[in-house]
Image (tube, rainbow, N blue to C red):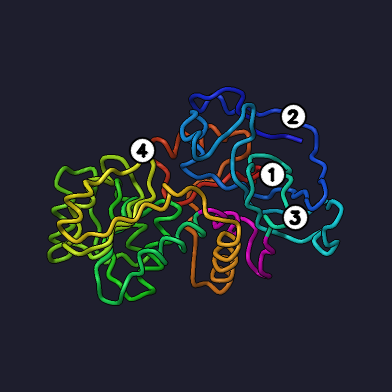
Amino acid sequence: MHAVQVASFGAPEVLTLVDLPDPVPGPGQVVVGMVAADVIFLDTLLRTGWGQDIFPRTLPYVPGGGGAGEVLAIGDGVDPAWVGRVVAVRTGTGYAEQVVAGEEEIMPVPDGLAAVTAAALVHDGVTALNLHRLGAPRRGEWVLVSAAAGGAGTLLVQLAVEAGARVVAAASSDAKRDLARDLGAEAVVDYTRADWTERVREATGGGAALVYDGAGGALGTAAVNALADGGRFVTYGTADGFAAPDRESAARRGIRLLMPLMDGPPDQETVRELLGLALERAAKGSLRPAIGATYPLEQAAEAHRGLAARTTVGKSLLLIDGE
């Protein structure tokens, strides 16, 4: 089978298309023929060797963390009814025509929901719903979503609007800000401007009650300045490393800092619950991933370049058949 492999940490060029043996399921495992592989910004960081203490990768490895496709084969102890089912799969690999995963790592895709849509929710759907629970936006309050046109950001905008909150979206281009407006954001700001947090405070009449920081780094750190006193700051961005807000200053202002990524990946039970909920909501039309960039498997490096350059509008996926 064809797969993308990383043999050495480095730039996008280390993503190489290779031929590997078709995987064979062991006891309790399945083989999924992939329709679409999820691509998230974290993949671009792990490719460079970043985050080995939290997300260890042993070279050579096939990057990614899942997607969606059809169960082709099962190992001992697995329910035969899985064969032929379209499933979402969240495991330790993904950029390949076939992946092997534990039975506990797959979820059935609801009837009527496209596999490509399911793939777009494998990580960002789980992330957004988890952050939504942490942030708990309230009716009528202002919520700032930074990196609002990203895979998780677009979902957070929708969830906050559904909760009755008023959303101000921060993004770096007109196309990204237009997308956020289409998803329900009431106000938008350009966070490449030096005065962007002041503009948020103006738009919200004194500062947001809740910030979802999808940027991280210096932008994420600055986003605390867009909060009103007593607000909540939920950060998950890693584009330039983690946000590093001043804890003493935040405490003086009564700001609650929530940094879930520092705790590592969520446990399997939580992932299954949230992924199931994301798929269910998408099937009902109440949660819509904004898929903005798709690439054939052999162009995985281009997908990474687009994410790193911040040019991608919406969600990125690899379409395994290239269509």
Foreground mark, 1 or 4? 4
Q: Looking at the image, is mark 2 or mark 3 earlier in the sequence?
A: 2
Residue holding disc 4: 241
Q: Nearer the viewer, residue 83 or 312?
A: 83
Q: Position of residue 256 (x, y in %)?
A: 27, 59
| Residue 19, percent from left and from top | 74, 29
- Depicted 266 relative to depicted 319: above or below: below
Q: What x and y, as percent, mark residue 86?
A: 72, 60
Q: Is residue 259 above or below residue 81?
A: above
Under mark 2, the amino acid is: Asp
Q: Amino acid at mark 1?
A: Asp
Q: Earlier in the sequence, mark 4 or mark 3?
A: 3
**Label 4 CA crowd tier, 10 Å (few <14, some 14–19, many 20+):** some
User: Label 2: which residue?
Assistant: 19
* Amino acid carrying mark 3 in the image: Glu
3D distance between C-alphas at marks 1 and 4 = 34 Å
- Is residue 138 part of the magenta span, yes or no? no
Give the spatial CA distance, label 4 vs label 3. 36 Å
Seen at 50% across and 45% down, the residue is 40
Q: Please tell me which residue lies in front, 46 or 34.
A: 46
Q: CA distance from mark 2 to mark 3?
A: 20 Å
> Are circles 2 and 3 on residues that touch, CB within 8 Å?
no
Q: Amino acid at mark 4?
A: Gly
In magenta, the rendered stretch is 107-123
Q: Residue 115 lies in magenta, yes or no?
A: yes
